Image: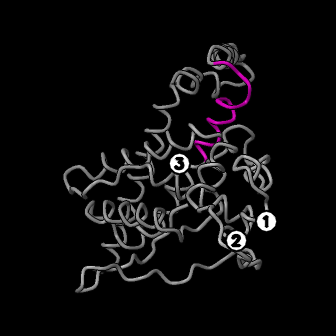
Amino acid sequence: MFYTVGMATSTPGGTSSPLPNAPRRSPHPRQRPARRTALSVDAIVRAAVEVLDETGAAGLTMRRVAERLGTGAGSLYVHVANKDELLELVYDELIGQVSLPEPDPSRWREQVHQMTGDLYDVLVSHRDAALAGLGRIPTSPKSLAAGEALVAVLRVGGLSDQAIALGLDLLGLYVSAHAFEAGLLEHGGMTPADVQQYYADVHGFYEALPADRFPVLASVAADMTGHDRAERFRFGLDVILSGLEAVSRGSGQAERR
């Protein structure tokens, strides 16, 4: 999920101000290293992504990641507190693959589509990765950078601060939910041909609904099942953006009264 957050600012010397200590959902601290370790957080995260792709979130354990790295699980706890923090780091790594545009008032909607579409593609390409984005408030560097970029784009689009702040979370949930649903089929053991056949069967099922029993569903069956995943994603995103614009206009009128 995205939330509006304050980014680190640059100091006169050209260096970035440090981020505050991130809140942790787990009380378990990292272990202090008894000796120097050759492992790094980057290496651990790369191994975790590989394990995630193979086993899904349920199979992602510190032990499996350690085995992938040829070490004991204890050495991982020097760098990562637990699986929950590991998932957060994995999500941060994946969201870092999204291109961050320079905000353009004339193209702000297009830029929102680009950022959210890129994130969707990244999450779908890694098994259960969307789960890592659900229920998480970004506090890691790449997630914060993405949140800052999306807030900046929404702001040049003329949205109110409230619409930006709450809409940011809504957009994050929308992308993660869409990506998770897509991943159920992409990584559920079905071949691309199986997926296409399933959608064709669903289309046929709804078109065959008896109109005397389900008159409204039967009347919209073609639109319900006649759009592909990309069209559905774009439609939902446009609905969200139009709603945020309407809320912003409404709040502006209320303030003028």
Q: Which residues are magenta?
A: 177-191
Q: Nearer the viewer, mark 1 or mark 3?
A: 1
Mark 3 = which residue? 175
Q: Position of residue 166 (x, y in %)?
A: 48, 67
44 and 149: which is toward the camera? 44
Q: Looking at the rendering, in which quadrant would you find the N terminus?
A: bottom right
Q: Residues within 10 Å of mark 1 (few under 14, many from 20)?
A: few
Q: Amino acid at mark 3?
A: Val
Rendering quarter of residue 184: top right
Q: Amino acid at mark 1?
A: Gly
- Check the image and tell me how it is coloured: one colour
Specify whether residue 156 is in view.
Answer: yes
Specify whether residue 249 is in view.
Answer: no
Residue at (80% x, 54% y) in the render: 63
Most frequent secondary structure within the magenta stretch: helix
> Along the horizontal axis of the image, is 78 left or right of 171?
right
Above or below residue 162? Residue 169 is: above
Q: Position of residue 175 (x, y in %)?
A: 53, 48
Spatial distance from mark 1 to mark 3, Cα to Cα? 35 Å
Mark 2 = which residue? 78
Numbered label attached to residue 74: 1
> In the displayed image of the protein, which residue is found farthest to the bottom?
12
Whether the residues at callouts 1 and 2 have beta carbons within 8 Å, the answer is yes
Residue at (68% x, 44% y) in the render: 52
Q: Does residue 190 belong to the magenta stretch?
A: yes
Residue at (70% x, 44% y) in the render: 51
Spatial distance from mark 2 to mark 3, Cα to Cα? 33 Å
For marks 1 and 3, the one nearer the N-term is 1
Spatial distance from mark 1 to mark 2, Cα to Cα? 7 Å
128 and 28: which is toward the camera? 28
Rendering quarter of residue 219: top right
Q: Position of residue 257 (x, y in %)?
A: 30, 81
